Amino acid sequence: MHALLAVPFLGALVLACIPSAHMRAVRVVGVLWCCVPLAVAIGLFVQDDTGVSYTVHAPWIAWTVGGTAVHIPWHVSLDGFSMPFVMLAAIVCAVSGVAGFLLTKRWKAFYVLLLLLTTAVFGVFVARDVVLFFLFFELTLVPMFFLIGMFGKYGRERAANVFLVYNGIGSAVLFLAVVLLIVHAGSFAVVGTPTMGNSFTSDYAVIASNLAAMPHDGMHTVLFWLFFLAFAIKLPVFPLHTWMLRVHGEAHPAIVIVHSGVLLKMGAFGMLMFSFVLFPEVLRGAASALAVGAVVTIVVGAVMACAQKDVRLVFAYASLSHMGFVLLGMVAMNDNGVQGALFQLVSHGLISALLFFAVAVIETRTQTSDIASLGGLGQPMPFASAMLMIGALAALGLPGLSGFVGEWLVLVGAYDQWRTLTVIATGSVVLSAVYMLRVVLGIVFGPPPQKHRADVRTIEAFPMVFVAACIVVLGVYPSVLHDVTREATKTIVAPYEQLVDVGGGV
């Protein structure tokens, strides 16, 4: 399992040693090395696709100050909860690496930063120590900041600064939450080892066990909302989404692929792992308010997507709406809702990768992403147009594609809790058809352009076909993902359902 962390990091070191003047070598090595973590992830998935955990737990950092001991273990795990996210990250980062061929300069910097980002993302999903999670979470900010600022449109540097400001605020909140969590629930004495005295650990399992044994108090509520706010910025949730629009609109599509496909999912992963799993009592009281916020996010995203003229911003607001569905499924905290949220996260990551890869190809050929300036590309660029159509149909929730399964499960899970809100959320599905079909009709159909537009090259076609195949497979055979996450979902929702049974409902 450590190969997931070692391989991309080693690739960054190797690329750093290749002279920038050897552009062909940099590009070839960069693309190939971006695919190696995918091979490793597939190998782990094939060896164990039942959700059983690969776990490494070893001493790492320990110190004693004034009689107080702090233990930070190296605790990483690949289980039914993290496996889908790791597979998604491996796929999306490989696709982003291939999309790097569309860049015109700084290939070495791109691939080094992308591989470092891949290492940090894998670390976020496998870390089972609170401090280790925080470190990997923060490490994603550095390469992403430079990727946004170095590649893209004229406003890319401002977009990078806005990204850093918003996520910096989220990081500060997360740091405060981590420190308070360790102080509040990290003591060994709470779990029956009084000989340890003033000993604290950041191990997630110990903290979770301690919190479960504690009576609910005001600190639980404070911690819940601190973690929620930190991850709501990353997800994002309305109205904390404006930084995402700048990134989607200004960064190069190769960077947006990994940003939309993976980094947004870190917010949902952290929110579920910390706020919802650790503090089910607080969630029980806040669930209805959070559900309202989720539906507002869904509706705002869908309405604003219908009004956009730039295809990038259409997809950006569509992502906001889809993340609203994720939040709605998570706060329902039942099997269907959480399964739907996890499925939606993986599905949206794949769909975003396909859509923004198609945008990257189209924008490279036409030098524009304005819908009104495009049109008729179905004839000169039939392959790229077909991939765009598949991604758009999946995003609007067409049955038989992955987007339908996730949204359906979320709505079924949410309907058990909030019928009126679920009906409103269902109405946004109609709007998703409006803005996605508008994109397809505006770009693919119409009279062909006067200037010749080259279609997709072989190296560009392969990842698009692979991702499209994944979208179809998940749509027609969702058990591929469901079987992996089934046991993890039961574990996640069990504490909340016990509270509901005792309290007589939400």
Image (cartoon, rainbow, N blue to C red):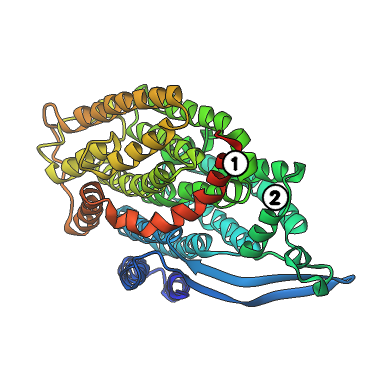
Where is residue 123? Give x, y as percent: 52, 64
Q: Nearer the viewer, residue 457 or 344?
A: 344
Amino acid marked by disc 1: Val
Tell me residue 487's x, y (percent): 42, 58
Total labels: the figure holds 2
**At numbered mark 1, what does the secondary structure look like: helix, strand or loop?**
helix
Cα separation between marks 2 and 1 = 29 Å
User: Looking at the image, is 415 positioned above or below residue 163?
Assistant: above
* Foreground label between 2 and 1: 1
Q: Quadrant of the N terminus?
A: bottom left
Q: Is residue 33 above or below residue 160?
A: below
Label 2 neighbour load within 10 Å: few <14, some 14-19, many 20+: many
Q: Nearer the viewer, residue 216 or 248?
A: 216
- Quarter of the rendering containing residue 341: top left
Q: Is residue 261 left or right of residue 210?
A: left
x and y percentages locating residue 205 in the rendered image: 61, 63
Tell me: 55 left or right of 59: left
Inspect this view and state whether residue 82 appears.
yes
Please give the name of the residue rendered at 41% of the width and 74% of the height, measured from the top-left corner.
18
Give the residue displayed 76% in from the left and 41% down from the top. Answer: 218
Residue 438: x percent and y percent?
A: 25, 26
Q: Quadrant of the C terminus?
A: top right
Instruction: Please give the residue where the numbered disc 1 appears in the rendered image.
Output: 502
* Three-letter code, disc 2: Ala
Pointer 2 residue: 177
Q: Is residue 132 left or right of residue 259?
A: right
Q: Badges 2 and 1: C-beta atoms under 8 Å apart? A: no
